[in-house]
Image (spheres, rainbow, N blue to C red):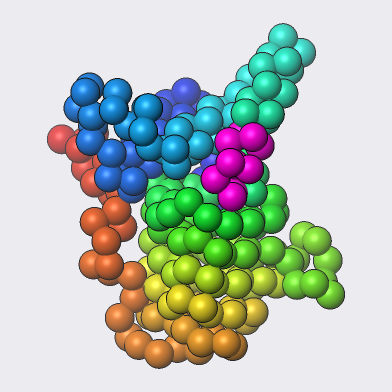
């Protein structure tokens, strides 16, 4: 699982999230977003918490980590999000304000686009740690439920109002329905400009 393990990672995650959220990366654009874009503000707090929790977890930083936990929780409640640190890889794009509940043991790769009224967790009858593992470049439509000890491959698009409780290991397809099934050979490619945020950023840094 791709987690923040250094300051360099932290800055990479922040910039990838900005690209995924289509934040204007000019100085004035970031300033405007700081005061107007609540989702970006939440994601910045979440990444800061991940950085300090993973890289600065010492007695000296404990009070600040607790403060960040509080800030993430209060900001999340305002927006309807229950998201724990170290769940999502870089390039997270939360599409809208609204209910979004993600178990702390869920693991999601790079460039996830996720919509409101979505629930990612263990089965009601399963163990709490039997949670989904979701690959890179996955699009999760609104009102989607993904539960259980399952695996979702890279580049998959999940249609709105889907219930996903079994694994899909074929790369680059669309699944939908309740229960979800394969409905198309076309996956998440080209759905949104966010989709390759980390690839764009790595190309930019290597140029």
Up the image or down, 156 lies above or below 37; here it is: below
What secondary structure is the stretch in magenta mostly built from?
helix
Which residue: 80% across, 61% down? 128
Q: Which residues are magenta?
A: 72-81
Residue 76 lies within the magenta run: yes
Q: Is residue 11 above or below residue 146?
A: above
Residue 173: horizontal and vertical position, in percent? Answer: 38, 80
**Foreground pick, 108 / 36:** 36
Residue 179, image x, y percentages: 59, 88
Residue 39 on the magenta span: no
For residue 13, say whether it is visible. Answer: no
- What residue is at 47 percent from the left and 68 percent from the top? 142
Image coords of residue 87 (percent x, y): 59, 49
169, above or below 122, in the image: below
Q: Position of residue 184 (x, y in %)?
A: 35, 87
Q: Quadrant of residue 8?
A: top left
The residue at 54%/72% (across/down) is 144
Q: Residue at x 44, y 69 (%)?
A: 141
> Is residue 81 or residue 147 the one in the foreground?
81
Quarter of the rendering containing residue 90:
top left
Q: Does the image show residue 197?
A: yes
Residue positioned most to the left: 207
């Amino acid at each position: 699982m791709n987690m923040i393990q250094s300051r360099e990672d932290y800055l990479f995650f922040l910039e990838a999230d900005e690209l995924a959220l289509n934040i204007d990366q000019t100085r004035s654009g970031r300033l405007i977003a700081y005061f107007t874009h609540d989702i970006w503000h939440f994601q910045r707090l979440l990444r800061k918490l991940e950085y300090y929790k993973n890289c600065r977890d010492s007695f000296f930083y404990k009070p600040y980590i607790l403060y960040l936990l509080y800030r993430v929780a209060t900001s999340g409640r305002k927006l309807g999000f229950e998201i724990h640190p170290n769940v999502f890889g870089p390039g997270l794009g939360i599409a809208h304000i609204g209910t979004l509940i993600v178990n702390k043991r869920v693991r999601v790769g790079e460039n996830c686009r996720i919509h409101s009224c979505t629930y990612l967790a263990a089965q009601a009858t399963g163990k709490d740690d039997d949670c989904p593992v979701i690959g890179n470049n996955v699009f999760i439509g609104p009102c989607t439920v993904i539960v259980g000890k399952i695996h979702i491959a890279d580049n998959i698009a999940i249609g709105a109002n889907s219930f996903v409780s079994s694994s899909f290991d074929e790369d680059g397809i669309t699944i939908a329905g309740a229960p979800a099934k394969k409905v198309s050979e076309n996956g998440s490619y080209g759905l949104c400009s966010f989709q390759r945020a980390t690839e764009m950023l790595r190309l930019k840094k290597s140029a």
